[in-house]
Image (cartoon, rainbow, N blue to C red):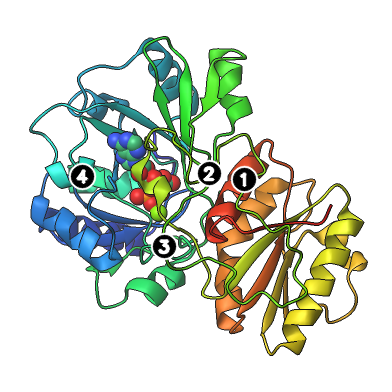
């Protein structure tokens, strides 16, 4: 694959050479991809990969994605590529698609795969990322470059907010274009693709390659039951009793007897702002706005610092000053905009000191599925049904 015109400037070349040297020395480097910033390490070095887990505070049972710069690098990492997986790779690499494949023993640090016999691999569609991986000369294990549980970074500044002092360096490539992580898929023996994590490549795009009916959402991928953050513990007394832990999608709620999620990371609370977050959904935008405005007002009276995440076309449905901090995800008609700005929006609520945040739900189709997945996880599954 051609990585395009980069690196163009001498400064770029220098920065890439320095970052690659850090990776070869076994240090960690954050770098831009088209989805979010990653925190990279030599995937063959257990000490380097350990440093990634330590910097993030990441549980060791959550495997890392391995990033490569050439299609031919895949052969050394895996034992087999199902024809359907190959078709997806041909269609979407470089790009926001991670494919889980049987790992070749002895090549990667066992920490990368968290003891699984599979590895998630992707080729990022970002010239700096591709140039860095090539210059490092090794497969690069990289989770998103945030502290575990925090929103993923879409700017170098976000990386530093979370990880300054804990990592070897950051390669600054400006704002990430997609804004949400890659879609993680695992092709089943029958050729069906199981979506373990919705992301930058939509289920509709996958189905266009594999055929309708050949793409399925993994069970138990939407809601986690991790203790701690995310719960709406500060709901004002007037909160509707209908708040439930049910995902709006087809995925099952936590606590059922479904098998363990296959993307181990999906069981943790993720992407969360510091304040409590609830997702408000309902049949009409007006009903959602009325319910949200009422809850926010009550919360404000109870001393909360309120936040509201909405779509541009619904702004007029709220009273002036509906929340202390109001952030728009842009138009519902262009979910790319919402995807791109979601994590920065969640960080904005932190900057504003928001303690009680409500987010409007969006339709669960196309990129909206990934947005809803992240909102559901950020909220710990707190949904308010406006009716
Ligand atoms: O867009 C992205 O994918 C970003 C950029 C940096 O490439 N990376 C990223 O990594 O989001 P991370 O570690 O935050 O998320 C990786 C996800 C986790 O949910 C993990 O459980 C899953 O991929 N995963 C990794 N290896 C897996 C495997 N062998 N089987 C199943 N799931 C796997
Ligand atoms: Mg992550």
Q: Secondary structure at mark 2?
A: loop
* Comes first in the chain, label 4 or label 2: 4
> In the rendered view, would you say 79 is above or below 196?
above
Task: Answer left or right for 347 relative to 264.
Answer: right
Question: CA–CA distance between discs 4 and 2?
Answer: 23 Å
Task: Answer left or right for 369 relative to 225.
Answer: right
Q: Residues within 10 Å of mark 3 (few under 14, many from 20)?
A: few
Q: Residues within 10 Å of mark 4 (few under 14, many from 20)?
A: many
Residue 227 circle label: 3
Residue 153 at x, y = what percent? 46, 63
Question: Pointer 2 and pointer 1: residues touching (CB < 8 Å)?
Answer: yes
Question: CA–CA distance between discs 2 and 1?
Answer: 7 Å
Task: Answer left or right for 155 relative to 234.
Answer: left
* Comes first in the chain, label 2 or label 1: 2
* Comes first in the chain, label 2 or label 3: 2
Image quadrant of ligand 1 equals top left
Question: Pointer 4 and pointer 1: residues touching (CB < 8 Å)?
Answer: no
Question: CA–CA distance between discs 1 and 3?
Answer: 17 Å
């Amino acid at each position: 694959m051609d990585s395009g015109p980069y690196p163009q400037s001498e400064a770029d070349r220098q920065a890439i050479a320095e970052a690659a040297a850090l990776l070869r020395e076994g240090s960690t480097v954050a770098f831009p991809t088209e989805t979010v910033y990653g925190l990279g390490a030599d995937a063959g070095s257990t000490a380097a990969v350990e440093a990634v887990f330590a910097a993030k505070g990441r549980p060791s049972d959550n495997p890392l994605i391995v990033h490569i710069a050439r299609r031919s690098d895949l052969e050394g990492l895996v034992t087999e590529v199902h024809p359907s997986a190959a078709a997806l790779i041909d269609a979407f690499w470089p790009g926001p698609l991670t494919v889980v494949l049987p790992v070749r023993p002895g090549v990667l640090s066992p920490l990368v795969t968290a003891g699984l016999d599979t590895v998630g691999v992707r080729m990022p569609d970002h010239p700096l990322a591709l140039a860095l991986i090539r210059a490092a000369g090794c497969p690069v294990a990289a989770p998103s470059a945030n502290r575990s549980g925090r929103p993923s970074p879409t700017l170098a500044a976000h990386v530093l907010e979370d990880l300054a002092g804990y990592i070897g360096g950051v390669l600054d490539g400006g704002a990430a274009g997609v804004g949400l992580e890659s879609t993680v898929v695992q092709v089943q023996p029958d050729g069906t693709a199981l979506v373990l994590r919705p992301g930058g490549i939509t289920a509709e795009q996958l189905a266009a390659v594999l055929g309708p009916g050949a793409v399925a959402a993994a069970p138990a991928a939407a809601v986690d039951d991790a203790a701690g953050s995310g719960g709406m513990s500060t709901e004002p007394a007037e909160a509707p009793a209908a708040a439930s832990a049910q995902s709006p999608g087809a995925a099952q709620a936590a606590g059922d007897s479904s098998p363990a999620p296959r993307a181990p990371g999906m069981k943790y609370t993720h992407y969360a702002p510091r304040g409590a977050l609830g997702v408000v959904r309902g049949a009409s935008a007006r009903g959602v706005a009325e319910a949200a405005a009422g809850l926010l007002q009550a919360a404000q009276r109870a001393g909360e610092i309120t936040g509201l995440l909405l779509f541009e076309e619904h702004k007029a449905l709220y009273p002036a000053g509906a929340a202390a901090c109001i952030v728009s995800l842009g138009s519902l008609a262009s979910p790319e905009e919402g995807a791109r700005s979601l994590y920065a929006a969640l960080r904005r609520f932190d900057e504003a000191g928001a303690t009680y945040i409500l987010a409007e739900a969006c339709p669960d189709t196309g990129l909206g599925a990934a947005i809803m997945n992240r909102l559901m996880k950020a909220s710990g599954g707190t949904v308010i049904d406006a009716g």
